[in-house]
Amino acid sequence: MFQKKKIMIKKKGAIIIDKERCKGCGLCVHACPMKTLENATDTVNQKGYQYAQQILPNYCVGCASCATVCPDACISVYRGDSNLAEIIKDCVRIIYLKVKREI
Ligand code: SF4
Ligand code: SF4
């Protein structure tokens, strides 16, 4: 007889951190259940903060805990069902904010 196999589909997620706005508080690092984030140890952003970075992007499940706790809304989260237009819009917004700060 056939045995039914359980197929588990892991929900994938992705994040973008606006590192120049990050204050390095580490709240997102502690909030991530998958332990995919850490504060930079050998580099700082233009304000001198050890910004958060994702070190294990393949483990991100898109739960958005990191974005929820970030006091400065530096993190954008995308899930498997996010559409490309949404992702591009956020990338453009981040680039625009960076350019605006440098002028
Ligand atoms: S979305 Fe969830 S799994 Fe992905 S980095 Fe943020 S807290 Fe971690
Ligand atoms: S919670 Fe926000 S400000 Fe704090 S380290 Fe993470 S991204 Fe940076």
Image (cartoon, helix red, strand yellow):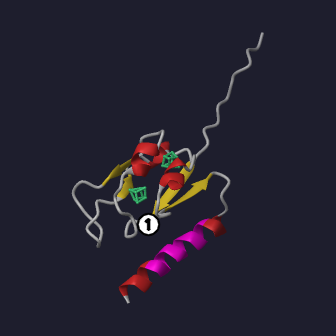
Magenta part of the chain: 87-97
Q: Residues within 10 Å of mark 1 (few under 14, many from 20)?
A: many
What number of labels is visible?
A: 1
Residue placed furthest toward the right: 1
Secondary structure mostly taken by the magenta-highlighted segment of the chain: helix
Q: Which residue is mark 1?
A: 18
Q: Quadrant of residue 45?
A: bottom left
Who's the residue at 64% across and 36% down the image? 9
Who's the residue at 47% across and 57% down the image? 70
Please determine whether, in this image, residue 49 is positioned above or below residue 37. below
Q: Give the quarter of the figure containing the N terminus.
A: top right
Residue placed furthest toward the left: 42
Please determine whether, in this image, residue 21 is positioned above or below residue 31. below
Residue 93 shown in magenta: yes
Residue 23 shown in magenta: no
Any atom of ligand 2 within 8 Å of the CB at mark 1? yes
Q: Give the quarter of the figure containing the C terminus.
A: bottom left
Could you say where residue 14 lies in the image, as x and y percent from the top left? 53, 54
Q: Quadrant of residue 22?
A: bottom left
Could you say where residue 69 lies in the image, as x and y percent from the top left? 49, 52
Q: Which secondary structure, mark 1?
A: loop
